[in-house]
Amino acid sequence: QVQLAESGGGLVQAGGSLRLSCVASGSRFSINAMGWFRQAPGKQRELVATLTSSGITDYADSVKGRFTISRGNAKNTVYLQMNNLKPEDTAVYYCNAQVRTDTLATYVRWGQGTQVTVSS
């Protein structure tokens, strides 16, 4: 089973920046797509940004122009650069991976989440 490890959350003032990282580890797998979702208190989990193995990106309208998703040199790593953060970006951010095994089975894996808090 693939495991996802997130890092980079924290407390930042409005207008500041943070960079989240997510590393997928395991054996005999490849990644179809990775992405970031977030969940604020009392709200449903929502998509923030996704990146396919072919390099196609998608962003929530609320973060377009401020957040950038990218892949590391090791293709099992994904980053989320968050600039010009706003208090409404406060949430637990979850890494998500669509995994393909060496037998071509696919499944979705979630990270444990990392807290991002933006103060006004």
Image (cartoon, rainbow, N blue to C red):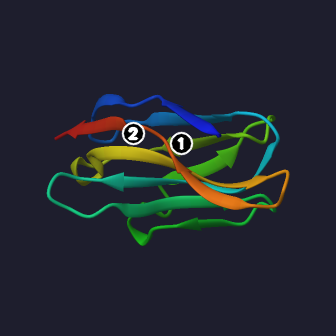
Q: Is residue 12 left or right of residue 21?
A: left
- Dot label at residue 81: 1
Q: Quadrant of residue 115?
A: top left
Disc with the residue nearer the chain's start (2 vs 1):
1
40 and 2: which one is in front?
2
Q: Disc 1 residue type?
A: Gln
Vertical relation: 64 (above or below) 109: below
* Amino acid at pointer 2: Gly
State how far apart marks 2 and 1 are (Cα).
16 Å
For mark 1, give the secondary structure. strand
Rendered location of residue 46, percent (x, y): 37, 64
* The N terminus, quarter of image: top right
Residue 114: image location, x then y, percent = 38, 35
Left or right, 93 with reference to 57: left
Neighbor class of circle 1 (other Cα within 10 Å; few <14, some 14-19, many 20+) is some
Residue 41: x %, y % from top left: 17, 52
In this view of the protein, which residue sits in the foreground, 43 or 81?
Answer: 43
Q: Secondary structure at mark 2?
A: loop
Residue 29 visible at all: yes
- Can you give x and y, in whole percent of width and height, for residue 51 in the image? 66, 58
Q: What quarter of the picture does the C terminus occupy?
A: top left
Q: Residue at x 48, y 64 (%)?
A: 64
Task: Name the residue rendered at 30%, 31% in the picture.
Answer: 12
Q: Quadrant of residue 73?
A: top right
Residue at which label 2 appears: 113
Residue 101 horizontal side relative to residue 111, left or right: right
Numbered disc total: 2
